[in-house]
Image (tube, rainbow, N blue to C red):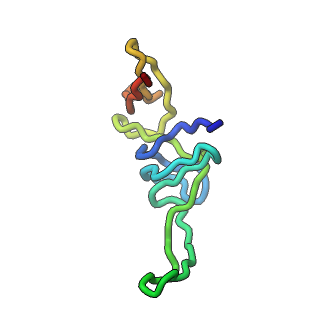
Amino acid sequence: MANKIHVKKDDQVIVISGKDKGTTGKVLKTEPETGRVYVEGVNIIKKHQKARTQAEVGGIIEREGSVDASNVMIVCPKCGKATRVSAVVNADGSKDRVCKKCGAVIDTVKKAK
């Protein structure tokens, strides 16, 4: 069974601990099984890649490494602060993710039919 992560792809987040503390970026990918997320510009790693064909070029490639999901917080689009997220169920069955600080709706998840 997949674990729950409080962030989704394309959320704007801020890193709250680790070597990249204070850095903001967009979530590129989530891995609920391991509880890790990939954030744009955070935890840059160097990968030594060999050329597989003659047309392909090898070299050292920099890319984002994963960060534990507990080390990031969502940045509210309205108030611009790092915040926790609460879930509010609407009358029609859809669910909103809401900022705990200002009460703004971050996004809405439609009810499955």
Residue 101: % across, % down: 45, 28
The structure residue drawn at horizontal position 50% and vertical position 52%, both measured from the top left corner, is 22
The structure residue drawn at horizontal position 55% and vertical position 81%, both measured from the top left corner, is 50
Res. 16 visible in picture: no
Residue 70: % across, % down: 60, 43
Residue 109: % across, % down: 41, 28
The structure residue drawn at horizontal position 38% and vertical position 40%, both measured from the top left corner, is 80
The structure residue drawn at horizontal position 53% and vertical position 65%, both measured from the top left corner, is 44
The image quadrant where one finds the C terminus is top left
Residue 85: % across, % down: 49, 31
Res. 76 visible in picture: yes
Task: Say above or below: 97 vs 12.
Answer: above
Residue extending farthest to the bottom is 54
Task: Say above or below: 82 vs 88.
Answer: below
Task: Say above or below: 105 vs 8.
Answer: above
The image quadrant where one finds the N terminus is top right
Q: Nearer the viewer, residue 64 or 16?
A: 64
Q: Nearer the viewer, residue 39 or 24?
A: 39
Task: Say above or below: 63 vs 83.
Answer: below
Instruction: Give the number of marks.
Output: 0
Residue extending farthest to the left is 78
